[in-house]
Image (spheres, rainbow, N blue to C red):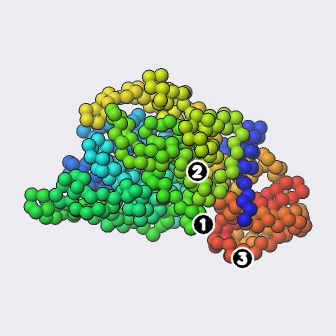
């Protein structure tokens, strides 16, 4: 079936919007910064953290908090939702043993109110979204001298991140269903946007959609013998998955997980049972539409499915190609703040993930984008030219930030997160944890990178979420929009058929029907009437875009088939 290259139109038109005087919601910042209100410390769930297990002897309940950004003067109460997850290496920024000491996680940030997180969340709210900057559970053992323990504790930390992201999605759906919709969201239009470690959360939540993908990962990298690896006489002496649903809870945190605590001095008798996962908001869907990855990586490339068998959320990525910690292609993830950096597990970076998503048919709504901003296009081509892999080519939903080399180490970039800045100029060594490092305090240097992130994200999100107003604006930059024609679709939602009617007797020339992945599924020419009826046939339920052409231009209509 012929594919409609919607994003080719999108990208060739979006960057002409500088000539358009009107501001368009979801493409531009239509609200002033002082119009954005922030509701702080909203609890979206409670779950078990192992961060203080050494103190309490068991996992303890932790409230999962978020700050919610909304435009205060907005009359729209059905806004797309962005859930934002901050960076931090799955460890707290402040030392648990000394809460006044920053840099415990080996990075320059790690809080939901990090400078870059606040800036991006504020800008998204200015564009008309409801945005939640979310915390998530932290804790693993990056400094263990046992490679299997590093890998085991990290995959469990990532698993908890997926559970928490899923819980946040369901919290909002529940609030819209029975909570009076206090945040004014459209529960059918949800984005997970992750920065650094948050990028791991958005990627893994999008593509790790079945628990069985963990034990079947490439080369059995998430299978181990815990007794052999740790020397713990009470650990099972068998090859078992590093994550077990009965112990860790299910993938979306809708089922309790129970782990026994053993006494090695008493024949490994069970002392008590520890709860590692509490259920949060069961009965609601954890699905979402779009994942945004800002410097993260994917646990295993086998988690990407063919779109015909299992559609997965569309994906946009940003990354520094020579990031020393998270690979751009395939490589071993290493721990920042250590000298030398400790290696943990092989993962797939943004380039490989985007390429595999395209070949699996998961990116049809994004794959044909063709950017016309010269700086965007030049940066992508520079990354391609500088790549040691001659098989690479620019990916249209991936933006590589090509950074100058570090004067002290030309093999490394000056920074792997140019969009970040902090108020902490230098972070001293923490014995046994970090070796000390410097942080960027130059906000003016970071903001242009956030500018690029926003303008690369905005038009793609319009199509991934099916936002009709900004889709029309994007397309109208390439071909004229029928400004004075009212187009009505009824019934909508529809079951068997939908009728399109152009008011004032305007003649419909052609009708194209596009599904949410960007495929052209119907193309009727020479209609020659002001009424057109489309019969659904065997189309699956879902959202469809009807693009209707007139002599004066075109109009679009979103139609839902139930």
Whichever of labels 3 and 1 marks the residue nearer the N terminus, that label is 1
Question: Visible in this render: residue 67?
Answer: no
122 to 215, vertically: above or below: above
Position of 523 with respect to 441 (left or right) is right
Q: Which residue is mark 2?
A: 355
Q: How many residues crowd around disc 1 within 10 Å: few (fewer than 14), some, or many (20 or more)?
A: few
User: Which label sits on residue 208?
Assistant: none
* Cα separation between marks 3 and 1: 19 Å
* Cα separation between marks 3 and 2: 33 Å
User: Which label sits on residue 308?
Assistant: 1
Give me the residue at 36% from left, 42% from top.
Answer: 343
Whichever of labels 3 and 2 marks the residue nearer the N terminus, that label is 2
Q: Secondary structure at mark 2?
A: helix
Give me the residue at 59% from left, 59% from top.
Answer: 360
Q: Which residue is mark 3?
A: 537
The extreme front residue here reads 390
Q: Secondary structure at mark 3?
A: loop
- Between 182 and 409, the one nearer to me in the picture: 409
Residue 406 at x, y = what percent? 48, 26
Give me the residue at 34% from left, 50% from top.
Answer: 151
């Amino acid at each position: 079936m012929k594919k409609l290259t919607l994003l080719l139109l999108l990208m060739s038109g979006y960057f002409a919007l500088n000539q358009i005087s009107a501001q368009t919601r979801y493409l531009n910042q239509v609200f002033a910064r002082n119009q954005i209100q922030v509701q702080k410390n909203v609890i979206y769930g409670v779950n078990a953290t192992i961060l203080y297990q050494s103190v309490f002897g068991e996992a303890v309940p932790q409230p999962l908090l978020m700050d919610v950004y909304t435009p205060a003067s907005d009359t729209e109460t059905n806004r797309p939702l962005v859930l934002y997850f901050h960076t931090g290496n799955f460890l707290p920024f402040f030392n648990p043993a000394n809460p006044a000491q920053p840099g415990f996680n080996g990075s320059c940030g790690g809080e939901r109110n990090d400078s870059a997180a606040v800036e991006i969340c504020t800008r998204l709210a200015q564009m008309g979204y409801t945005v939640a900057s979310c915390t998530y559970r932290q804790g693993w053992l990056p400094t263990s001298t046992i490679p299997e323990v590093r890998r085991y504790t990290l995959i469990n930390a990532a698993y908890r991140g997926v559970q928490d992201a899923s819980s946040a999605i369901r919290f909002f759906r529940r609030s819209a269903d029975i909570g009076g919709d206090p945040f004014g969201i459209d529960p059918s239009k949800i984005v997970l946007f992750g920065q650094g470690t948050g990028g791991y959360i958005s990627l893994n939540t999008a593509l790790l959609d079945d628990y069985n993908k963990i034990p079947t990962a490439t080369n059995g990298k998430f299978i181990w013998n815990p007794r052999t690896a740790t020397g713990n006489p009470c650990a099972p002496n068998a090859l078992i998955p590093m994550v077990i649903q009965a112990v860790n809870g299910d993938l979306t945190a809708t089922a309790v997980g129970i782990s026994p605590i053993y006494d090695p001095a008493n024949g490994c008798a069970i002392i008590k049972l520890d709860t590692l996962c509490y259920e949060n908001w069961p009965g609601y869907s954890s699905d979402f539409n779009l994942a945004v990855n800002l410097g993260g990586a994917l646990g295993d490339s086998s988690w990407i499915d063919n779109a015909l068998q299992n559609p997965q959320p569309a994906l946009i990525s940003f990354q520094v190609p020579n990031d020393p910690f998270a690979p751009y292609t395939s490589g071993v993830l290493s721990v920042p703040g250590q000298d030398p950096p400790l290696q943990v597990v092989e993962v797939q970076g943004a380039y490989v993930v985007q390429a595999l998503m395209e070949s699996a048919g998961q990116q049809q709504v994004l794959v044909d984008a063709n950017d016309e901003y010269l700086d965007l296009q030049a940066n992508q081509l520079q990354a391609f030219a500088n790549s040691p892999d001659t098989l690479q080519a620019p990916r249209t939903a991936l933006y590589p930030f090509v950074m100058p080399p570090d004067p002290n180490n030309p093999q490394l970039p000056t920074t792997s997160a140019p969009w970040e800045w902090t108020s902490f100029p230098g972070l001293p060594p923490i014995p046994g944890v970090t070796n000390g490092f410097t942080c960027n305090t130059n906000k003016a240097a970071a903001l242009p990178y956030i500018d690029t992130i926003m303008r690369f994200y905005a038009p793609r999100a319009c199509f991934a979420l099916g936002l009709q107003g900004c889709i029309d604006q994007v397309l109208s930059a390439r071909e004229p929009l029928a400004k004075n024609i009212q187009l009505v679709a009824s019934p909508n939602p529809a079951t068997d058929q939908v009728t399109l009617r152009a008011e004032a007797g305007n003649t419909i020339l052609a009708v194209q029907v596009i599904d949410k992945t960007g495929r052209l599924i119907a193309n009727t020419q020479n209609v020659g009437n002001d009424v057109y009826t489309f019969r659904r046939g065997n189309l699956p339920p879902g959202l469809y875009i009807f693009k209707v052409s007139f002599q004066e231009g075109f109009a679009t209509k979103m139609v839902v088939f139930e």
